[in-house]
Image (spheres, helix red, strand yellow):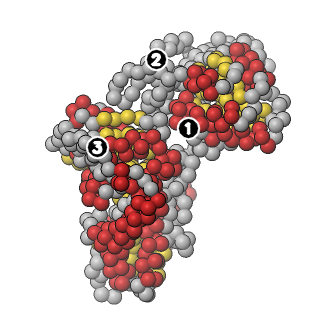
Amino acid sequence: MSKQMIMGNQAIALGALKAGVNLVAGYPGTPSSEIIEFIAKYKAKTGTYVEWSVNEKAAVEVAAGASYAGSRTLVTMKQVGLNVASDPVMCLSYVGVKGGMVIVSADDPGPISSQTEQDTRNFAQYSKLPCFDPSTPLEAYEMIQEAFEVSEKYNTPVLLRPTTRVDHAYESMEFPELGPCRERGIFEKDSKRWVIFPRSSYNNHKRIFERNEKVLPEEFSNSKWNKIEGESLPLGCTPVAFAAGGISYCYLMEAISILKRENPDNVQLQKIPVLKIGTPYPFPKNLAEKFLRNYRDITVFEELDPVIEENLIRIAGRSCIDCHISGKLDGIVPVAGELSVEIIKDILLSKLSIKAESEATVVTSASEGSSASSKETAAPELPVRPPVLCAGCPHRGAFYAVKQAMKNQKTAYCGDIGCYTLGNAQPLDMTDTCLCMGADITMAQGFYHNEPERKCFSFIGDSTFFASGITGVVNAVYNQSHQVICILDNSTTAMTGHQPHPGTGLTMMGEIVEKISIKKILEAVGVSPIFEVDPFNQEESVKAVKKAAESKGVSAVIFKSPCIAIAAKLGYKFTGAKKVDAEKCIGCRKCINELGCPALSVSLAKNAKGKQLVEIDRGLCTGCGLCSQVCPTKAIF
């Protein structure tokens, strides 16, 4: 073994491989995507089966089959994917499993790249599944191995809940020796166990309650993942203590370390009591009660929901412990978004009544007659850089074509989850709604049935179509909607890292398979007419959109052009960056104001009439030609 810098998601993957996982399934979603991709690199060595499933529900069900047989399985997803998977997950909680089954649900405080800030720890309690909450990549590596053991010991799926900063952090750790996966299990028929019925669920509910309320809380109270640090306080110190879990624990310990360096003579900082929670459900009640009995003032640091805080309040009330617990519920800790070392440090200063070092420095400087001000030394704020569609992105052409075709008409543009959500930004402004994956097609139906005179459009990517769009298409045809379904087919799952999907003809096992045709699916359901166009051919695209909008019932336009990031790999030939003819450019900026391409900008150069010209960044321009078609004077060539 050798020490390497390992990413959090890679550590999770390695932990699963070290545990001998037999089957891995999931659906790509930041911040979890790299787990499956890393496992796939070692599939030949370990014999582990790996797949990108069409969605998270399918992934859980695939894993359940193998787990019923006694094989170890891993399912990966981001937190909103757990919503999609919740149907089989809830039932598996009652039925149970045989082979260890771990579900990684990566939470996204911020959120950085998600629709919601939902907390998997609360889902764990709701679904009655044990949950591990790692603070570092190394903990994630070790925790997932223990999660498999807990899963098999109690015949239950187990949740692992890393957050974005744990998933994408790096830590130096030993790279383990990887051998073959465990011997695969053999399914034994037992309908009393594997067929879910009301009576069996009733009996299992009682068993699960006993496990989660009595057995596991005691076991987790003695777990190394839950501990009390800095218990012995020097005499005369205020009995202030803190609790934390996940990445917030690391922030807390770093903040304490900084304060110790800044205040070396402060006795109070030498041994600050900290309760670390690594298994938020079932909660380690015995350990928590011991902690609460020793301290009067406890502040809880955690991201997203006040899970630890509410558990401590519940235990204090039930055990009649006289203490004050602060956190999100009383506004001491921010209720939304990520925490940080700086946020926690400021709260510690207030709680421990310590003057900030920066304040002391300012006072000293002023007393010495220094003219320097904090404003002069402060670093300027970073400029705001909102995300935009890439230069050469085919989605820009699709949105622009629909916008031109539907000028001055009453419309509703329903968007979906993917790069194309950025179609909402100016100047395109082509996404009126975005709810969840697949909702564009069904929400457009609601708009139509409510206002039949409105032209209703839905925009959905090829990967999202396979994941959750087909059901909406069936519903639209069956219930006689009138709408245009725009399929933005860029031949990949672009937003999460260009993973394959059923329309690409490639699996995670490296197999070349027949591509599943979106057009044939639409035809089979009854969508008509269906147009296939290149979004960079604006004339043809606009014509297709107009014909689709004029048709009765459900129609579709498939805008087919590869994502610019993978176009070269697919054999797409670039024509070279475009140029601006300074003599023809009138400085109208129509190309900039209507397309919003990041390769276009205003030049310092001026034409004969004194108007600033447009210039093209040759390092960004892909030569897609969209701006050439928009320019009224044909100045771009």
Vertical placement of residue 96 versus 419, above or below: below
Residue reaching furthest to the left: 1
> What mark, if any, has residue 27 been given in the picture?
none
Disc 1 versus disc 2: nearer the observer: 1
Q: Would residue 487 appear left or right of 88 to someone viewing this image?
A: right
Q: CA distance from mark 3 to mark 1?
A: 30 Å
Point out the tag, 3 or 1, that comes first from the N-terminus.
3
Q: Residue at x 55, y 38 (%)?
A: 468
Label 3 sits on residue: 187
* Residue at 36% across, 84% down: 293
Q: Secondary structure at mark 2?
A: loop
Q: Which mark is residue 468?
A: 1
Q: Secondary structure at mark 3?
A: loop
In what element is the residue under mark 1?
helix
For mark 2, what is the residue? 570
Q: Amino acid at mark 2?
A: Leu
x, y percent for residue 73: 32, 45
The reply to whether residue 619 is visible in this rendering is: no
Kindly report which numbered mark, 2 or 3, lies closer to the viewer in this rendering. Answer: 3
User: Residue at the spot x=47%, y=21% of the render?
Assistant: 515
Q: Within 10 angstroms of label 2, few (less than 14), some, or many (20 or more) residues?
A: few
Tell me which corner region of the image, top left, top right, bottom left or bottom right, holds residue 529.
top right
Amino acid type of the residue that numbered disc 3 sits on in the rendered structure? Phe
- For the C terminus, give its image quadrant: top right
Relative side of 374 to 403, left or right:
left
Viewer-side label of 3, 1: 3
